[in-house]
Image: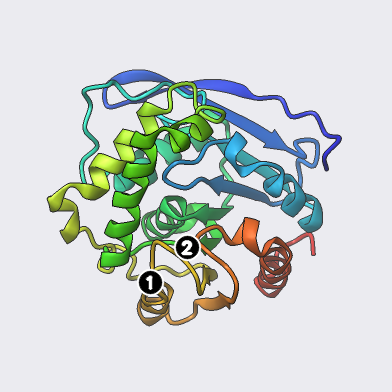
Amino acid sequence: SKGKKHMVEFVSLTHGGQPVSIEYQWLNREREHTPLLVFLHEGLGSVSMWRDYPQTLCDAAGCRGLVYSRPGYGRSTPREPEARWQPDYLHIQSWQVLPALLDALGVDAPCWLFGHSDGGSMALLFAARFAERTAGIITMAPHIFVEEITVAGIAAAREAYLAGGLRQGLARHHADPDSPFWGWNHAWLNPAFRQWNLEADIVGIRCPVLAIQGEGDEYASMAQIDGIQRIVPHTHLLKLADCGHSPHRDQAAAVTEATLAFLRSASFAQL
């Protein structure tokens, strides 16, 4: 997969009454009759932040992939410096922006969602609201409510960003690193965000669900994926030892193997 040249493309959408440009990338586009895996990035992620994992997974599954950077991230239109993301910002991304993007790209068949962290929460929100558009979801290190460990991790990220090292790292993946960082950081550290909770929103998810979390996740406890299974009883859980908040990096082979087995059990057409 390393030899493949990825073309990053852009599409225009309306978001919050303003036109925004969204960076996206098709993987294995030529396999037009195969299922589609849509990758939803983390709270500081982007197309490039995934590195080659989406390509590796799509090659292993024999399917197509779609990777994109949300507004404010990567090479998509940055957040206005004074704009404050409110506690419902992930609902807006899941219920407005993602469906608009799929429409703009002509994706009308049900797709599979592979979400990490904030993107894992988005996969749950999208599946609950758009059952007819969702074939199944893999939600990795998701949040469904706010824990003390989450707030502490996000406060620590703020210190690292102000110290400069984290900002430098993010500048490799975002045209304007302040845009995603402060959008995400201010939202999660806003006292109003303590009430943020998806438990009522995800009742009624019908599609197959695989929820993955590392035992060493520095942003959440197992209460997150255990909570998903309590609300959506048919959820499959994968708990990984020696694994932090990014299972696809810390335990890539285990995540790929579990995802392929899950797709197979959910009668994913290609496997």
Picture layout, residue 21 above or below residue 63: above
The secondary element bearing badge 2 is classed as loop
Picture layout, residue 19 above or below residue 84: above
**Which amino acid type corresponds to the residue marked 1 in the rendered image?**
Gln
Q: Position of residue 99 (x, y in %)?
A: 44, 40
Q: Which residue is mark 1?
A: 224
Please give the label number shown on residue 61: none
Q: Nearer the viewer, residue 149 or 33?
A: 149
Tag 2: Cα neighbours inside 10 Å, few (<14), some, or many (≥20)?
many
Q: Nearer the viewer, residue 24 or 12?
A: 24
- Asked if one can make out residue 125 in the rendered structure from this viewpoint, the answer is yes
Q: Residue at x 48, y 56 (%)?
A: 132
The secondary element bearing badge 1 is classed as helix
Q: Which residue is mark 2?
A: 141
Quadrant position of the C terminus in the picture: bottom right
Q: Residue at x 50, y 52 (%)?
A: 133
All told, the count of numbered labels is 2
- The CA distance from mark 1 to mark 2 is 8 Å
Give the mark, 1 or 2, whose residue is nearer the N terminus.
2
